[in-house]
């Protein structure tokens, strides 16, 4: 599988599948995954497709995640999976960290033991 700057696409897909089952009860459809060399973000979720049933993409910055622990990758991925859930449920995204996003934080803490940092608000 492809990787960029040491971040394996296989690892991202495996984490996504694990989190999908453990947090979202396996209900999220698999997105398009991209490992990029972006320097401006850790990860992002967007919907590049304009077809009647658009497919969500999750991009992980290989540059930003190079040399950091797997926990940071997991934090970034589960954050973007909440945005994927918003897309899949027709909730306008645009970096939406409203109550529909925030209500997932205690669920993720309980199910995965991950405390997402609110660094996106900085």
Image (tube, helix red, strand yellow):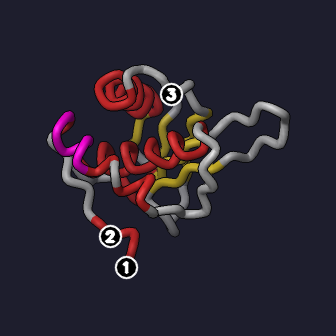
Q: Residue 109 magenta-drawn? A: yes
Mark 3 / mark 1, whichever is N-terminal: 3
Q: Residue at x 84, y 33 (%)?
A: 52
Seen from the viewer's position, the closer of residues 104 and 9 is 104
Q: Is residue 96 above or below residue 78?
A: below
Provide residue 114's location: percent of width, then percent of height: 20, 46
Seen from the viewer's position, the closer of residues 108 and 3 is 108
Q: Quadrant of residue 113?
A: top left
Q: Residue at x 69, y 34 (%)?
A: 55
The span picked out in magenta is: 106-111
Write down the residue under mark 3: 28
Q: Secondary structure at mark 1?
A: loop
User: Are discs 2 and 1 less than 8 Å apart at CB?
Assistant: yes
What's the mark number on residue 9? none
In the rendered view, does 77 fall on the left or right side of 28?
A: left
Write down the residue under mark 2: 119
């Amino acid at each position: 599988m492809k990787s960029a700057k040491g971040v394996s696409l296989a690892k991202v897909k495996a984490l996504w599948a694990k989190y999908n089952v453990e947090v979202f009860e396996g209900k999220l459809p698999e997105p398009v995954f991209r490992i990029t060399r972006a320097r401006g973000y850790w990860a992002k979720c967007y919907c590049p497709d304009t077809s009647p049933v658009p497919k969500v993409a999750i991009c992980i910055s290989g540059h930003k995640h190079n040399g950091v622990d797997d926990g940071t990758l997991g934090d970034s991925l589960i954050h973007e999976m909440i945005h994927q859930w918003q897309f899949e449920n027709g909730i306008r995204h645009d970096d939406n960290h409203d109550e529909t996003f925030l209500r997932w934080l205690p669920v993720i803490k309980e199910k995965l033991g991950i405390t997402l940092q609110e660094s996106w608000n900085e």
